[in-house]
Image: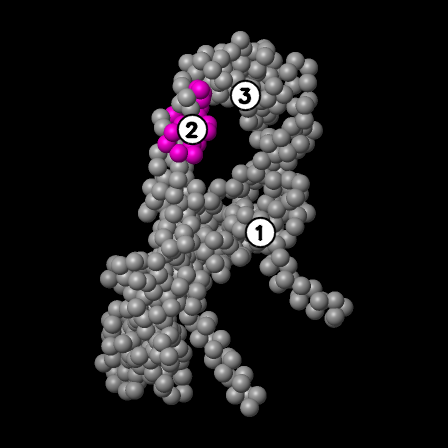
Amino acid sequence: MLFLLITIVLSKEDQSIRISQSCATYLTGYFWNGQQCIQCKQPSCKCQKSQGCDTCLNQYYYDSTAQTCTPCPKGCIKCCKSDELTQYICTLCLNGYIMINGVCLKVDACTQISIHGRCQKCIDKYFLQESCQACPEGCSACDSKYYCTVCDDGYYLAINEQSVSCLTCNPEEDREGCKSCVLDSKQLICLDCLDTYYFDQENDICLKCPVGCFTCQNPSQLPQICYTCLTGYLLAADDSYCENCQQQIPNCMKCSTNERSRNFQCVDCNNGYYLTQDSKSCQPCNNGSNNFRRCESLTHPTQCSVGYLLFQNSNSYTCVLNTHSCYTIDNIQGQCKDCNFGFNLVLDTSLQMSVCKNCTENIKNCITCDVDNSRQLICKECIDGYYGNLCVQCTSNCKKCLNESQCLTCSSGYYLDDSNKCQSCEVSFCMECTKLKECARCENNYGLSESICKPCLSGCQNCDGNLEKCNVCSDKYYLTATDNNCKRYKENCLATNVNGYCYLCETQITYDQSQDRFYDEGEETPIFDEQADSQFYISNNGYCLKCNDYVTGSFNCPQICKVDEEFASHLLPAILILLIFQ
């Protein structure tokens, strides 16, 4: 009984996982709400609701307050952010990178790096000359670009007066596949063939095996051509060729092989097909109907095509056209139960059913909507210059009003007269005035002087009362304590004290913007450009200096910050195991 219960639970979990996986091939950017796939807030999110992110993909930092994902610095799988500083500090690096003081440094072909980021040893096919340089073509190992010591398969060692190089065993365009050869009286003699090739003794050349064959023989000698097959292929029944999964089981997405019985078993089918009970074929869902995206059988969909919702009616499932922008539906006619973010559930009197309507599309100039007692859409908040449930325009130059005749506040540069109409201040660069030609507040970078607005000194945002002294500085400027003037921050600085001492420096993270787009199952995976080098700055005697300098090999970055909760939860079991076995 317990085994049966476990089996049922696991089968339900498998189905749930299968359905959620089919929302997006890479398990990101979408979530399954029980009836359809919904986009998360960002493509880099993992979420259970569209309004925010629950966690992020690798290479992104999760901001739990804003529920958003921010790119980590280059080379990071996981990163965290310092509470006191602006830096994103790496806690785990991608393959091909090494961590030095919280920075992931790209190693390229280097296998050993000093604590200063200098390469000390290279991988095969590279030699060390300040950095790792590639050996010439055909070399497996070399001491310089002029001296090869070992050749790749398909090449032979050629010695001359100025260099030792590796030359190809297959110089002619119509010949390939020779693995090793010797030069005898200026003639190349092939000794052995590469894998997936066989030796034709009659012509002394290597010829390609049939597709899928790993080892084979000349087909003119015996009826058996292929001996062994490449991974993903199996010998056919007559041992004459190798076939792949899709040849045996068309429309199979993922296969497993059984070498003993020499056949394939399908694990999962392509979209629009289901796996038969014997796992030997993929059959079309609903006889190929285009509204079943995934199914368990001919009549049991598990996910519908885009624009359709999966609905369970009694013990059967069907795909219902989502005509009214529903989040979920509660009957086969497509009546909305819940709405997508930005939509409101209202009563369509002509259809006599609940539908979802978008606020901004149905009530022009409305910011947020609500539903009245008769379940009709009304505006809750209009943009400036409009009022009421239907967002009617206020009188000319009125910013906020109760009705057509009663203005509450005027637009910038206007004042409200005794008849509740907005009149021009007639003062250049004035934002607020109490009456004609008497300004009360100027635009940024201007100061109030004798009821008119005059320009402040450079970098000053407000200089009311004295144009030679500043009250508030613009961004990237600080107010000096001695003469109340504004001076620009030092380069790469974010905050200073009154003496201009910079105590907070910026972080520059550049990344491929094309990653911020949604891609669905079936679409070709986008190819992302590699990030440019992320640059951190750290305060040193009031100046912002590079803490990660790739040129000099200096890495003096902060290494302490709050690790995200998901990453910490993965680390905890490993830490406990280490403690137990100590």
**Residue depicted at x 35% and y 42%:** 390
Q: What is the three-letter code of the residue carrying label 3?
A: Gln
Q: Is residue 117 left or right of residue 217?
A: right
How busy is the neighbourhood of tag 3: few (under 14 within 10 Å), some, or many (20 plus)?
Answer: many
Residue located beneath label 1 in the image:
64
The stretch of residues the image draws in magenta is 397-418
Residue 226 shows in this picture: no
Q: Is residue 72 left or right of residue 405?
A: right
Q: Comparing marks 3 and 2, which lies closer to the viewer?
A: 2
Between 440 and 256, the one nearer to me in the picture: 440
- Badge 3 or badge 2: first in the primary sequence: 2
Q: Is residue 349 magenta?
A: no
Residues at marks 1 and 2, CA–CA distance in whole angstroms: 41 Å
Q: Comparing marks 1 and 2, which lies closer to the viewer?
A: 2
**Residue depicted at x 57% and y 54%:** 78
Q: Quadrant of the C terminus?
A: bottom right
Rendered image quadrant of residue 155: bottom left
Place of residue 316 in the rendered image (x, y in percent of width and height, measured from the top left)? 35, 79
- Badge 1 or badge 2: first in the primary sequence: 1
How busy is the neighbourhood of tag 2: few (under 14 within 10 Å), some, or many (20 plus)?
Answer: many
Residue 444 shows in this picture: yes
Q: What is the three-letter code of the residue carrying label 1?
A: Ser
Between 397 and 5, the one nearer to me in the picture: 397
Q: Quadrant of the N terminus?
A: bottom right
- In the displayed structure, 523 sits above or below 394; it is below
Residues at marks 3 and 2, CA–CA distance in whole angstroms: 30 Å
Residue located beneath label 2 in the image:
407
**Residue depicted at x 30% and y 68%:** 333
Residue located beneath label 3 in the image:
461
Place of residue 547 in the rendered image (x, y in percent of width and height, measured from the top left)? 62, 38
- Circle 3: element type: strand
Q: What is the three-letter code of the residue carrying label 2?
A: Cys
